[in-house]
Amino acid sequence: MKKVDPELITDYTTQIKEETGSNDAYPEISIIREKSAEDDRVYINMEFLGLDLSSIPSKDFKDWKTYVIPVLYVISSFVSMKITTSMQKKSEKNKEKKLDENGEEEIDVMAQTNRNMTYMMPIIAISISLVAPLGLALYWLINNILMIVERLILNRIFKDKEELVNE
């Protein structure tokens, strides 16, 4: 939208508000979707692999394709969290158990928080991805996939180094 005249965006925003009577959270997306057919000056191709990245799942209930990216994002979030927690469990096994003054095992607050976040973060993310354009969910999905690959590679590297040290 940087290349589009700001006055044109303002004019179209007010025009869409008057036509629909609603205060849209994403007026620029409404301009792209509704006015690009009328005016080539605001046309931006939002297609990616057959998906319209400007579509919002909560507005397009009937189009099942708008739910593909949010569902893949949730799956990748769970995979990412499981990899992280498994790596943390492995590192905890290597550490000595911490004892408090009474000689009892200390409860690791960080581990409890991570367990709670394992399930809360995907729920929060799916809530946001249902009301935001698909482009945001795609960004999160790609970020998660890259993070999973990074963790797997780093896990392999550190595992190989630990095996060399232990030999």
Image: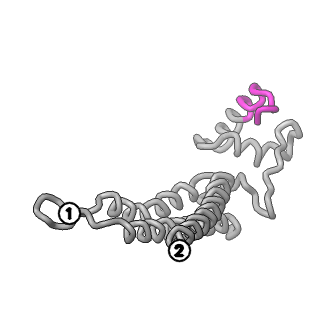
- Total marks placed: 2
Q: In this view, does 43 lie to the left or right of 85?
A: right
Q: Is residue 45 left or right of residue 104?
A: right
* 131 or 77, nearer to the observer: 77
**Would you place residue 159 above or below residue 41 in this image?**
below
Q: Residue at x 48, y 68 (%)?
A: 87
Q: Residue at x 65, y 44 (%)?
A: 20
User: In this view, which residue lies farthest toward the right?
Assistant: 40
Within 10 Å of the Cα at label 1, are there few (<14), some (14-19), or many (20+) other Cα atoms? few
Residue 145 coordinates in the image, percent (x, y): 64, 63
Residue 99 coordinates in the image, percent (x, y): 20, 63
Residue 120 coordinates in the image, percent (x, y): 42, 62
| Residue that numbered label 2 is attached to | 167
Kindly identify the amino acid type of the residue bearing the numbered disc 2. Answer: Glu
Q: Residue at x 27, y 67 (%)?
A: 97
Under circle 2, the secondary element is loop
Q: Give the range drawn in magenta.
A: 1-12
Under circle 1, the secondary element is loop
Is residue 70 at all visible to an observer of this figure?
no
The circle on residue 99 is 1
Tags 1 and 2 touching, CB below 8 Å: no
Q: Indicate whether residue 5 is drawn in magenta.
A: yes
Q: Is residue 46 left or right of residue 106?
A: right
* 82 or 132, nearer to the observer: 82
The answer to which of marks 1 and 2 sits earlier in the sequence is 1
User: In this view, which residue lies farthest toward the front?
Assistant: 167
Is residue 48 at all visible to an observer of this figure?
yes
Kindly identify the amino acid type of the residue bearing the numbered disc 1. Answer: Leu
